[in-house]
Image (tube, rainbow, N blue to C red):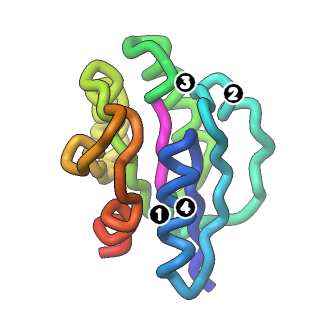
């Protein structure tokens, strides 16, 4: 069976809900509002071997080397065949997340391409789900 995980902050919550409304095999969602990379590092690992993962993190952290280090630890602690990172609206954080994704050859989806009211959350998560499920 294909297993998927959505891991991260509020954008992960919204993306996970939208994906699970459309996707017959439900993805596990480990995401909470305002989660930081440091908090995510402390979360218990599921023990599953996921075929795909969506990482939605970085929005609640300052950009830079410390964030890159934490994201790298998260990425290396979980085994996935396919990883897609949601790049935050904030450009400094997006560049940091993108640099980690590039290091691993992972895919990215830039949230900046989706309409937003607050420059943090997409207005319509079903549009994000459509892109992720392609």
Q: Earlier in the sequence, mark 3 or mark 1?
A: 3
Q: Give the distance between the C-alpha atoms of the residues marked 3 and 1, in whole angstroms.
A: 20 Å
Q: Earlier in the sequence, mark 2 or mark 1?
A: 2
Q: Quadrant of residue 34?
A: top right
Q: Quadrant of residue 83?
A: bottom left
Residue 106: % across, % down: 34, 50
Q: Secondary structure at mark 1?
A: strand
As drawn, 90 above or below 123: above
The magenta stretch is 54-58
**Mark toward the viewer: 4 or 3:** 4
* Label 2 with label 1: CB-CB less than 8 Å: no
Q: Residues within 10 Å of mark 3 (few under 14, many from 20)?
A: some
**Mark toward the viewer: 4 or 2:** 4
**Which disc number belongs to residue 16?**
4
**Mark toward the viewer: 3 or 2:** 2
Q: Secondary structure at mark 2?
A: helix
Q: Earlier in the sequence, mark 4 or mark 3?
A: 4
Q: Secondary structure at mark 4?
A: helix
Residue 130: % across, % down: 32, 71
Q: Earlier in the sequence, mark 1 or mark 4?
A: 4
**Which disc number belongs to residue 70?**
3
Residue 58: % across, % down: 46, 29
């Amino acid at each position: 069976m294909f297993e998927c995980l959505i891991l991260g902050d509020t954008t992960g919550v919204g993306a996970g809900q939208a994906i699970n409304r459309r996707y017959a095999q439900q993805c596990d969602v480990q995401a909470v509002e305002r989660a930081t990379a440091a908090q995510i590092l402390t979360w218990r690992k599921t023990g599953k071997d996921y075929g795909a993962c969506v990482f939605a993190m970085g929005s609640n952290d300052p950009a830079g080397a410390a964030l890159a280090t934490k994201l790298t630890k998260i990425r290396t602690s979980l085994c996935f065949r396919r990883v897609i990172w949601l790049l935050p609206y904030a450009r400094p954080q997006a560049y940091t997340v993108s640099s980690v994704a590039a290091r691993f050859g992972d895919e990215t989806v830039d949230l900046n391409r989706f309409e937003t009211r607050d420059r943090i959350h997409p207005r319509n998560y079903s549009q994000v789900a459509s892109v992720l499920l392609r």
